[in-house]
Amino acid sequence: MIRLNDQQMTEEARSMRLDRILENPIFRRACHLAGVEPTVRQASKYVNAKGAAYAFASQAINELEQLAEGRSAGESNMMRRSTVHHDPLSPA
């Protein structure tokens, strides 16, 4: 069994955390809004509450929430439409 020292374990944990940040939709949207690439360096800054992407985090969250609300409303409208059946032969 290979044993890692504390520094290696810390670097491994940091790398795993940054990989998760790189996949985070809020981080990716914030990068888009800031006009920067979602890189490991930008993710590191984001985690430390610095950088261009971090400056747009609130706006990214708001946009994604609005998108989710719009999708939810759209899905419920689609459900409503699909459950209402009209007989084309009956008078309106």
Image: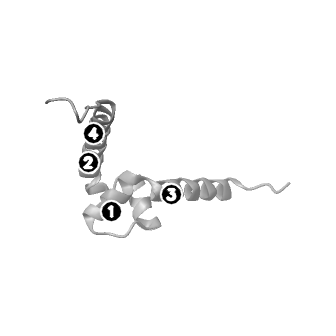
Q: Residue at x 43, y 68 (%)?
A: 39
Q: Say which residue label 1 marks.
A: 31
Compared to 80, does 38 lie above or below? Answer: below
Q: CA distance from mark 1 to mark 3?
A: 14 Å
- Tag 1: Cα neighbours inside 10 Å, few (<14), some, or many (≥20)? many
- Helix, strand or loop at disc 3? helix
Compared to 13, does 84 lie above or below? Answer: above
Residue 48 in view, yes or no: no
Q: Earlier in the sequence, mark 1 or mark 4?
A: 1
Q: CA distance from mark 2 to mark 3?
A: 19 Å
Q: Say which residue label 4 marks.
A: 69
Q: CA distance from mark 1 to mark 2?
A: 12 Å
| 89 left or right, relative to 41 | left
Q: Residue at x 60, y 59 (%)?
A: 11
Q: What type is the residue that disc 4 sits on?
A: Glu
Q: Which mark is residue 58?
A: 2
| 14 left or right, relative to 9 | left
